[in-house]
Image (cartoon, helix red, strand yellow):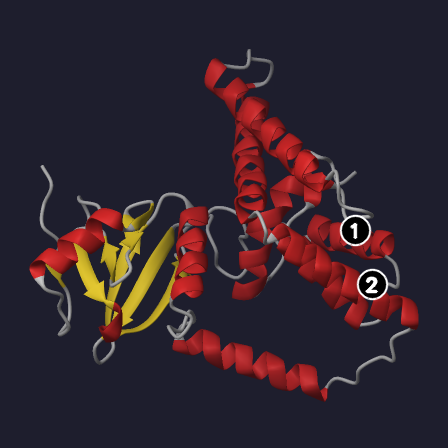
Amino acid sequence: MILKPVKLGKEALEREEMLRDRKSCKRFGPCGVGEKALYLSSFYFQCRYYLPYKGILRVYKRVAMSKGGFSRKGVFASIPYLVVVYDNGVEKQCTYKIEEQVDQLLSYLKEIRPEIKQMSPQGEMRAAERERNRKRKPKPELTAEAVALLHTLREAEAVLEERPELYRELSEAARQKRQVLLIIGERRGSKVKKREEAVFTRADRAKEEMERFLSGREAFPVPARYAHPVVLRRMERIVKEGGAADAAQALHLVKEALKALNSDVEVSREEYDEVVVVKAMFQNEEYR
């Protein structure tokens, strides 16, 4: 049974306009992004509610603090939510099982509706504070090699954005494979099941597709198995801070930083968002 979406907030669409928009909306898990509105889930139904963009104040991701989840120390287990703030600060929260789907929705929403804020008020305050601290911190004088490397890293990021579905699949497949490896390790010697083999095949295929995509690119700064914008941005930060002047050294420092992050290490909300996207890619490859 298909239920007509229920309006949230003060703004509304004409019935036929809303139904057409919902039918053509791009789905990300239980929620959808239309041309005219966001379509949000209830506890039982997908795309049960709708909010025209005119009434939306901000849309962002929240990760629950739960046992074994993010509490500024746990960087893996989590319960992700999509949070939409509308009207005069009313909040609607949608539960997700797969965190990447929230990230994908926000990324797509940013493309079509860049004017909608994607941080909580608290997140904006922390970002502003980090920016003030960054400006107060003395900037090292970069060598010509470091400047050239920054240019290379930015060009590489632009290359990956030509086919964003490839790096997203690389990350998602790696995370799924990591979970299966942990389960198999706990079983201690049991046979690999067919569905687990399918996960390994998916991860291998994701790497192969990225390798094919990058095969015609000269001197891409990271191996295809690590080809993700988050990796490149972390390398950029290292270079800007004077920590490395070549790609190999910058990537080595990214690996060392990721190795050091575990459930006993305190991290910021922003650091968590980056780590969960790329750490499994490195773990599965044993950081080689």
Place residue 235 in its image quadrant. Answer: bottom right
- Work out which quarter of the rendered image holds the N terminus and state it: top left
Query: Residue at 58% across / 34% down in the picture?
Result: 178
Q: Position of residue 284 (x, y in %)?
A: 66, 34
- Residue at 15%, 65% (x, y): give it: 8
Is mark 1 in CB contact (under 8 Å) with mark 2? Answer: yes
The residue under label 2 is which amino acid type?
Leu
Residue 172, visible in the rendered structure: yes
Q: Position of residue 180 (x, y in %)?
A: 53, 28
Decide if residue 243 is in sight here. Answer: no
- Between 164 and 137, the one lying in front of the other is 164
Left or right of 237: which side holds 107?
A: left
Which image quarter is the C terminus in?
top right
For marks 1 and 2 on the same chain, the one whose residue lies earlier in the sequence: 2
* Residue 4 percent coordinates (x, y): 9, 50
Residue 221: give its label. Answer: 1
- Residue 77, above or below 134: above
Q: Is residue 217 above or below residue 90?
A: above
Q: How far, Cα to Cα, is label 1 from label 2?
A: 9 Å
Q: Which residue is mark 2?
A: 149
In this picture, is 35 found above or below 199? below
In the image, what residue occupies the spot 79% across and 72% down? Answer: 241
For the point 11% across and 41% down, the residue is 2
Left or right of 115 in this view: 75: right
